[in-house]
Amino acid sequence: MYGIGTLIFQFLTSKELYYQELKDSNISRNDEEKVLKLITAAVEPQLPETVEGSKDPTILGLKKIMREALSYNVAHRPTAIELTKKLQQIFKNSQEQHEVQKSLSLKLLLLSKNGRKYL
């Protein structure tokens, strides 16, 4: 599951796990011993403010799953089945939200076009 957490981190940030911590400490990504120390010290990787401060429900759900999957305590990590269910729910909600936004945009467009007739 830790690897899935790493993939979600990379998906959200387009960066490697612990990129900020390594940059701040002037540690080379190739220094595996120092990277392992970050992992075994249960250091949570830093997300950029654009991701950390996001209110987007999809981003919020992915961050939650990522943090669970990256938990140092294996007992706190989701199983593959749990992770699949959580991801399915996030994407289902995201798709429903997109459909609502699309419908509202269409209604606004129609209202604006109909409103022009009366101007």
Image: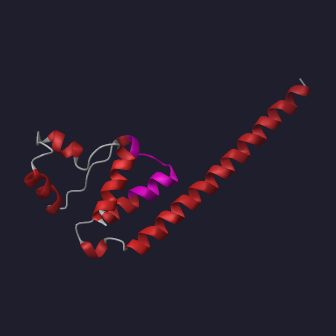
Name the dominant secondary structure of the magenta segment. Answer: helix
Front residue of this view, candidates 66 and 11: 11
Q: Is residue 52 visible?
A: no
Compared to residue 50, the image places residue 43 above or below, namely below
**Magenta region:** 50-63
Q: Residue at x 15, y 45 (%)?
A: 29
Image quarter of residue 96: bottom right
| Residue 95 x/y as whole percent | 60, 55
| Residue 65 x/y as whole percent | 39, 62
- Left or right: where does residue 65 sit relative to residue 116? left
Q: Residue at x 82, y 36 (%)?
A: 111
- Left or right: where does residue 44 sit relative to residue 110? left
Image quarter of residue 94: bottom right
Q: Quadrant of the N terminus?
A: bottom left
Q: Residue at x 39, y 56 (%)?
A: 63
- 64 within the magenta span: no
Front residue of this view, candidates 75 and 49: 75
- Left or right: where does residue 85 sit relative to residue 97? left
Front residue of this view, candidates 79 and 64: 79
Q: Residue at x 32, y 59 (%)?
A: 5
